[in-house]
Image (cartoon, rainbow, N blue to C red):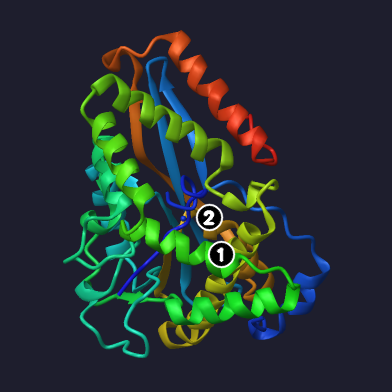
Amino acid sequence: MRRVVLCLAPGIVLLAGCSSPGGGASRRAQEPIPAPEPYVRIANTDSNRVQLQIAARQFLPAHRGEPVVWLTGVSHIGEPSYYAALQTQLDAQTLVLFEGIGAAEGDGAADPRDKPGPSGETAGNRGSLQSAMAASLGLVFQLEAIDYSRPSFRNSDLSITQLRRLMTQEEAGSGKPGASESFDSLLQLMEGSSWFDSLLQLALRFLGSNPKLQALGRLALIDLLGQLQGDPSRLQGLPPEMKQLLEVLLQRRNEKVIADLKPELRRIGGGGSIAIFFGTGHMPDLERRLLQKLNYRPAREVWFTAFEVDLARSKVTATEHSFIDNFVNWQLSEAGASGHGSR
C-alpha cells in the first residue's frame, strides 16, 4: 500500500456537492462566505525563537442534533511534543477522519496499523523521503509519531487507483495531458525509487550532520510553509499539469471527506465531535465546504507549534536569517505565489 502527501515538486507537494441540513442552504447562499483564515502562521515568541504553528479550528452546527467538527491541520514533520499534543486533541473526539492515500482498496476492515499514514507507507515501510527529511532536521515524521490504531480513527481518502482514474478524466476533459505522469513521478519520489531520491537522501544526510545547517534548513521550511500559509494552491505560476495534479489531490479528496462526513453527522448526533485530520493544504477548501454545504460556523481555534528554531542557541546570525528570508521570497515570487511576503 502506498500513500502520498502534498509537496511543491519536489519540495512542497512533499511536506502535502452536499445539501445543507435543515433547510439552511438558502440562508447560506444569500450570505457572503468570508475567506478562511490561514491554518499556518509564523510566530516569534521572543527575539530568538521562530516557530511554525498549525491551527485546529472548531466548527459548530446550526442544529443541536449534530456534532461539533474540528478541522485539524497537520504538518507532516514536527517535534515529538507537537504530535503528542495532537494525539491528545484527536483522542478526545468521537471520530477522526484521517488522510491516507493507498489504504486497502475496498477493504475498510484492515488493521489500522497496516493503513498508510501521511507518508505513503505502512508501519513496516518507513524509509520514505519525508522520514529522511524529518531526521535531517532533527524532527520526527507524522506516521512514526501518531497512533493510527485508535478505534475512533477511520481512513477517509481515495485509493491510488481512484486518483489515477480521476486524473485521466481531468486530462480528457481539459485536453492537457501530464497530471498522471506527474503523479507517478511523485509516487516514485516518495517511495525512494528514483535516482533523484538517492541524491536527495545524500544531501539530507549531510544537512543533518551539521547543527548550523540543520537550523537553517528548519528556518527555510518555516519561512516557506508560513508564507504559503500551508496552501500549495497559492502557487499560481505552476505548470498546467501540476495544477491538474493539485486539483485532484486537494479538491477531489476533500469531496471524499465530505461524503464520508455527512452520514456520520446523523449517526453521531449532538454531543459528539468529529475531527478531520489532514494536511494544511486541504483545510481552506474543507472550511468552505463546511460553511457553504453543511451550514457550520467557526467557533474557536487552537494553535500547535510544529517546530521551531532558537536563533541564539543555533548561532544563526541576523544576516543569515535575512538571507534565508530573501531566498524564500525569491523562490515564491518565481513560482507565482499569491499573497506571500507577509509575516
How many C-alpha atoms fall within 10 Å of the one at disc 2: few (<14), some, or many (≥20)? many
Going by the image, does 113 lie left or right of 42?
left
Label 1 sits on what residue type? Answer: Leu
Q: Name the residue under label 1.
A: 250
The answer to whether any part of residue 297 appears in the image is no
Q: Name the residue at the front extreme.
A: 195
Assign the N terminus to one quadrant of the image. Answer: bottom left
| Distance of label 1 from label 2 (alpha carbons) | 7 Å
Q: Earlier in the sequence, mark 1 or mark 2?
A: 1
Q: Which of 276 and 157 is in front in this view?
A: 157
Residue at 74% in and 73% down: 175
Residue 281: give its label.
Answer: 2
Residue at 41% in and 63% down: 187
Instruction: Kindly check if marks 1 and 2 are in contact, taking CB atoms under 8 A apart as contact.
Output: yes
Instruction: Give the answer, above or below, for where 298 lies relative to 141.
Output: below
Q: Name the residue at the left extreme.
A: 124
Q: Where is residue 136 in the image (x, y as percent from the top left)?
A: 26, 37
Residue at 41% in and 27% down: 219
Going by the image, does 340 lie left or right of 196?
right
Residue 311, quarter of the rendered image: top left
Going by the image, does 126 lie left or right of 58?
left
Q: Which of 74 and 326 is in front in this view?
A: 326
